Amino acid sequence: MKVSQILDVLNAQIVCGNTDLNQDIDFGFASDLMSDVLTIDSDNLLLVTGLNNLQTIRTSEMSDIPYILFVRDKKASEEMKSLAEESGITLMECRYSMFRACSLLCNMGLEPVY
């Protein structure tokens, strides 16, 4: 699934990071528990979460997750954006609930990790 498709279907926006809308994202994983995120071993992953703090960015960096989508209208702080930029992580935001966002992404063909 292309980044542009994700942004379009979720009425989302990129708030920092790679703005190449033609980038492919192969898998999605949704969690607010960073301990669960640490167990994921997939390349080219979109993390869908409502947990908007620095720990989310650090966990994604350790797990080589290049894309984070904040749901429930959660906003990334400037400190989070700065850390994400340093780590090469793209942050996106949308107003939808995690359930709705995941349902739409799944219907559009984004593959789950398991």
Image (cartoon, rainbow, N blue to C red):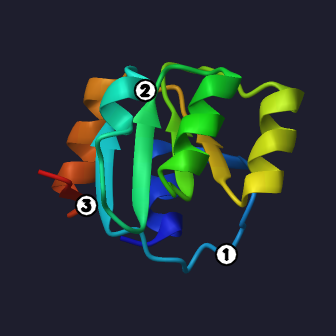
Image position of 30 (left or right of 19): left
- Residue with the most extreme left position: 114
- Residue with the most extreme bottom position: 22
Residue 102: percent from the left, percent from the top? 27, 39
Tell me which residue sits at (20%, 64%) in the image: 109
Look at the picture and state if 1 lies above or below 110: below
Mark nearest the camera among 2 and 1 is: 2
Image position of 13 (left or right of 60): right
Which comes before the other along the chain, label 3 or label 2? 2
Tell me which residue sits at (44%, 57%) in the image: 6
Say what secondary structure mark 2 lies in: helix
User: Does the image show residue 31?
Assistant: no
Residue 76: percent from the left, percent from the top? 73, 28
Residue under label 2, please give it: 34
Say what secondary structure mark 3 lies in: loop
Identified by mark 3, the residue type is Leu
Crowding at mark 1 (Cα within 10 Å: few <14, some 14-19, many 20+): few
Image position of 60 (left or right of 110): right
Give me the disc on residue 20: 1
User: Does the image show residue 83?
Assistant: yes
Give me the disc on residue 110: 3
Which comes before the other along the chain, label 1 or label 3? 1
Identified by mark 1, the residue type is Asp
Mark-to-mark CA distance, 3 and 2: 21 Å
Of residue 32 and residue 37, the one placed in the foreground of this image is 37
Look at the picture and state if 12 lies above or below 85: above
Identified by mark 2, the residue type is Met
